[in-house]
Image (cartoon, grey):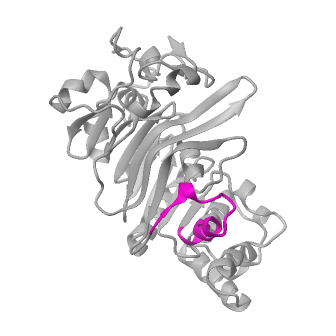
Amino acid sequence: MSQSYAEEGASAAALADTPDETADPVLSVRDLEVEFPTPLGVVGALNGVTFDVPRGKVLGIVGESGCGKSVTARAILQIIEKPGRITGGTITLRGQDTQTEITKLGPDSARMRALRGREIAMIFQEPMRSLNPVHTIGAQIAEAVLLHQTRDRKQAHERAVEILRQVGMPHPEAVATSYPHQLSGGMRQRAMIAMALSCNPGLLIADEPTTALDVTTEAQILELIRDVRDRSGMSVMFITHSMGVVAQLCDEVIVMYLGRIVERGSVDDLFHDPKHPYTQALLRSIPRIGGDRKVPLEVIEGSVPDPHTRVAGCPFHPRCPQAIPGRCDTAFPGRSTAGPGHTVHCHLHDDDAAGHTEPGEDA
């Protein structure tokens, strides 16, 4: 059972999120809606997404391809590819003494350009597509420093070499004079991290930065991000499709499916007491050390619905083995509290909220 976005638009306000307050969040997202008009219809990439990024912690966002993880990151930085657009909600950056509502800023405004790199930085998935092939690594890092911190080119170059050294780059002076194609994949990703950290941002967004790396290099990059967080106290929003990476790095986790948040909790909560059937299915699909090799890995039956139509009710119900007919396929579940800081959008757990289930609310 499905319906168009237009048919569901009238009920969008009823799905507004009012999450549990996170103590001193660095970023607050409320009721975020993002759409992509296409010749075949409107694709709703994000539908009422609400969450806080805790200050000084690593928040993981996990889900299958197409669930809205990267769109969320790009919306925060106002770099959504056209014709995509934010159609509702707010994004608020909270500094120590000030706060800025990002959704009120134009993507090309001076204030938004100042925020990018200086207060919010992003590491992209493919460094070869993000690094300029005709400029040296040092010049590209120095460019950010010149834009946000100093106009002295010598100081900017020295800062570039210093930050390359801080991220564990061997021979940083030589790397600063190298071009992207002269570096290995792991070194390019370290260079991207150095560029992101060059202006000491309060929030670092990492969009699947280890996807194309081998497991050894991946472990090194994860350790680097953890060390940077511990040294600087910055907040990290880490986007991934890997629950294994989440277990290694994150403090809290958001699980997304088809443009909605379906569960949020601490890493311990989600690994030891997952509530949503989708979260449970993701965990069951992880290979186990010492497991029987003759037993095939469990897969999530079905496929993600066509993006041009919105599934009525819970977006996961067509693939859910526990779906309740007449309930899961008619209304999106409200937020149920499964424990301190642990919330789930699932009709199976409506009663867990002790009668207090609010439409669209999320922690």
**Left or right relative to 258: residue 324:** left
Is 118 contained in the magenta span? yes
What is the residue that sits farthest to the top in this orientation? 325
The quadrant of the rendering that contains the C terminus is: top left
Q: Is residue 205 left or right of 292 when viewed as pictured?
A: right
Residue positioned most to the front: 10
The image position of residue 112, as x and y in percent, is 61, 65
267 horizontally vs 162: left or right: left
Question: Where 221 falls versus 305 (above or below)?
Answer: below
Q: Residue at x 52, y 14 (%)?
A: 2
Whole-percent x, y for residue 250 in the image = 38, 53
Q: Nearer the viewer, residue 159 or 353?
A: 353
Q: Which residues are magenta?
A: 99-119
Count of marks overlaid on the render: 0
Viewer-proximal residue among 162 and 155: 155
Residue 181: x and y in percent read 79, 62
Q: Residue furthest left?
A: 354
- The answer to whether residue 231 is visible is yes
Residue 287 in view, yes or no: no
Residue name at image x 58 percent, y 32 percent: 44
Q: Nearer the viewer, residue 352 or 29?
A: 29
Quadrant of res 227 = bottom left
Q: Nearer the viewer, residue 327 or 180?
A: 327
- In x, y percent, where is residue 224? 49, 65
Is residue 149 depicted above or below 300 in this figure?
Answer: below
The residue at the point 76 percent across, 64 percent down is 180
Where, by quadrant of the figure, is residue 286 drawn? top left
